[in-house]
Structures are given as C-alpha cells and as structure tokens.
Amino acid sequence: MHAIIRPFTDNILFLERVQASTVARAQGTSDGISQDDMYAWSTEFSARDGSWRSLDVKSNMFCSAGGYLPDGTVVSLAGGQPSDEIRQGYDGIRLYKPCNGTQCDWQQNFDIHLQERRWYPTIKTLASGDLFILGGSNHAASINNEHINVPNFELFSPLPGPQKTIDFPFLVETLPNNLYLIVHLLPDKNLSILASTKVIILSTSTWKIIRRLPDIPGPPRNYPLTGGSALLPLTPENNFDPEILVCGGATEFSTQAKGVASCGRIAPLSKNPTWEMEDMPFSRMMPDMAHLADGSIAILNGANTGTAGFDRASDPVLHPVQYLPNEKLGHRFRVWNPSMIARMYHSVAFLLPDATLLVAGSNPNGKPVEYGDGPFPNEYRVEKFSPPYLFPQGSPENVRVALVQPEFITHSTHMSQRYVGLEIVQRGSVVEATVSDDTQSKSRVVEAGLLRVKAPANNGLAPPSHYMLAVVLDGVPAMEAKWVQLSS
C-alpha cells in the first residue's frame, strides 16, 4: 500500500492494491460496507477514530509515487497496469485538492498526464515547490532492465520550453537495482540521488551531475533489495549541515537472501565525504525509517530473509529500533518492544500530529487470495505505536521546536520526508497582566510561556509546503503538533 496524510487533518489517504480479499468497496464506509461489485482502490482513514470511506479512483494508482503541492494538494503520479475495472495509471496525474467538506475526492483529467509511463518512480519536492519525478520502468517487472528502464526525469509543474523530459544516463549506469530511488533535497537546493550503491549530487539549476560521492559499502539499497533512508534533522545545533542515513536491505536478489544490518551515514556537502558505517541491532530489508517528534528516527517493519516483491520474503522483523543521530558511533540504537503483527512487503509507518506512529499494511501475496490465506496474510489491521517519549519521567527543562514535513510512503521510500529544527530567538515574554481577587485589582509583570522562533533561512532548508510544527520539552512532545504552511 501507499499512504499520505492530508494537511490540517489526521486523515490518511491509503492507495491500495485491489484483490479478492479487499474489504473496501466503491461507495463504502466504516458505517456500512457497500455491496457494490467494484472494489475501492483508495480510502480515506481517520487516525483519530478509525472511520474510513471509499474514494473514487479512475486509473490504477498502485505502484505510484506522490507528494504535495505548495497549496496542500495531495498528488499521486504514475501507477500500474489496466484491468477490467480501471484504466492504466502509468502516466496518471491524480489530485486530491484541499476542501472543507467531507466529500473531497481524487480528481483526474486524462488530457493532462506525465510525459513518460512510469512504474516505481521517485518524487521529491524541490525548493521551488515543484515535484521532481525520476526514473521507474515503463511497466511492471520484478527487477528493472534495459528494455523497460525509463532513464530520465520530468517535473510537475512541467519544465518550461519544448523539452519536457531530461535524459539521465545515471539510471542506465545503475541498472538493474534502481527502482524507487533514494532522493534527498539538500539545503543548497540540489539533490542527492542514491541508485544501487552509487551516489551523485544533481544541480537543480543546470540539471547536471556536479559531484559523485563514494559508493555506499555493501549491496545495492534500492528496490528490489530495498533498504531505507532518511535525511537526518537539519537543526541550528548542526548548522543545518545535511547528513544522510541509509540502513538495511538484502544481500542479493533471491528468496534466500539475508537481511543487511549495516547503516551508512554521510555528509554530502562536506569537503571529503565518507561513509561512516555501523550495524543495527537486527538485520532488516524493507525497513520504514520515519522521523519522530524528538528528532530521532524510528526503524521498523520488514523481514530478514528474501527481498521485496510478491511471495519473496519471510522471517519478519518485529522489533522497532530507535536511531539517535546525536549519540556517538556505537551508541545510537535503542531496541523497543516488538509488534505482534508481521509487516512485510507493502507496509508503511509514519509520524502523526499526536507524535505517535501509524503503522499499517503488509500485502506480500502475488496471487489473488482470500482474507487470511498465505503464510503472511494480507493485513488490514492499523496500529498506532506510542514511542517511549509519550511516557515521560521528570520535569522538562530544554525545549526544541521543529517543522516536520510529512511524506508519501511506499516500498520503504519516504518521499520528501524532512525535519527542520527552528532557532529559538526568545524564551518567554514579559507582559503586563491585571490580576483580580475579591478585594482589589492590581497590575503586575508576569512571565508568559511564549517562544519566538526564526523561520528557515531559505526554501532549500524547507521548501514551500505544509508542515507539522512540533514542540518538544526534554525529548517529550509538549502538545499535538500544529499544521502550518510555508510559502515560497
């Protein structure tokens, strides 16, 4: 499955693969299951009360990529093959626009479409607010190859001028393990791109490769060997210098492959970037790596044997792991209590405004199956995981304020996820207050609990989009995050 949160809500848009065990039908809701013969390809789910409703989808949005436009419109681009019930979605552009009602829905104009047919591409929000759409293959396959590879990129909104796509030979060089690429927007507004084991920096002004970084040690980290990645928090304490973390994957393209324990960390803009390697407590392929409110990274879901793909993995990894970026090498991991639910291929995990993680999915069965069939049945239970910071001890003293950009999540690829710490420029505000009791009124000076913070210096640090504003006291979320919009 794929998932993305609607700005200013805690509602999740799930994009799903339809098969015999699918519960949601067209026109269905959690209050009444529709008897419609058509299955629902997408639903809107409330993380607050568990209610849901089916959405109207006109093309196959499974195997797509996605993101946000600056106005809060949710975008699903590309997709999968046609069927008797739905049109092909390889070149599809589907928009879920902001609205105040309860009947918002996907919109698609078939006269407006991508320049290329794409399956398993990657999208990244640029500093301009446009969406960078990279790679993929032109139809479904277990692994990419030269006959179906799409070695170019395009933008949404489209590039100006007659040339709407730009050739990118790097995607020929890195075959076959280069689907759902790992892409991060750097503070200088350029892009780091990891394909297979190779890493480059692409200029977003000239669209040329301006730097090649050292290869990451170990096997390829993209689909179908599938590791995970996160851009570590950009904060005043680290001078907003970017570091990229890449963890896990599989040793080879085999159902008997073993999970990879290694994590690599690199500072792509440093003078002499090198990979700093360390091992997670558990080997893991198909990990989800989600930012938490306190600036740490949660690593969860996935398996320890096989690869991504239908019917290809076993040995689920049930323990979540916390990665603490500011600790010293060798002391950065904490193991948390395990789940009882195997989250295999097509699982997701991401931060909610209340500082919990929503965990869902697992659809590893290739053939249409009935509910409950297979060694790892298709999973329809949704969990909310409460990190330890929601059970605090002691009195808070230190405060952190951060903008957390939510993401489009699929196949362990968290597109446009971002955590930007804000500089606190004033703590507390002295104000005059009138205090009354039974006998008199008097004026006195009091200290109000006010923080003033400085907005990000440029849209390379925080591109125009919607963010969750998190306030954390000694690592403990002080309140539910508030939605804010940054313009260009």
Image (cartoon, rainbow, N blue to C red):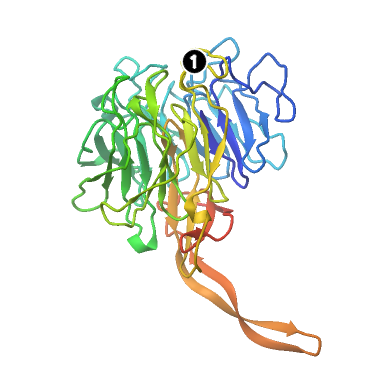
Relative depth, front residue between 482 and 304 = 304
Q: Position of residue 58 (x, y in %)?
A: 60, 21
Residue at horizontal 57 percent and vertical 49 percent from the top: 353
The structure residue drawn at horizontal position 38% and vertical position 32%, both measured from the top left corner, is: 286
Q: Nearer the viewer, residue 274 or 478?
A: 478
Q: Position of residue 366 (x, y in %)?
A: 46, 15
Residue ID at (48%, 19%) = 80
State whether residue 344 is above or below residue 296: above
Q: Where is residue 160 in the image (x, y as percent from the top left)?
A: 44, 35
Which residue extends farthest top?
Answer: 84
Specify whether 206 is left or right of 475: left
| Most foreground residue, 81 or 170 | 81
Indicate whether 19 appears above or below 339.
above
Q: How many marks?
A: 1
- In the rendered image, the vertical position of residue 449 relative to residue 180, given as above or below: below
Residue that label 1 marks: 81
Secondary structure of residue under mark 1 = loop
The residue type indicated by label 1 comes to Gln
Q: Is residue 203 visible?
A: no
State whether residue 215 appears in this view.
yes
Could you say where residue 154 lies in the image, as x and y percent from the top left? 41, 31
Q: Residue furthest right?
A: 438
Asked where in the image residue 307 lies, by quadrant, the reply is: top left
Q: How crowded is mark 1: few (under 14 residues within 10 Å), some or many (20 or more)?
A: some
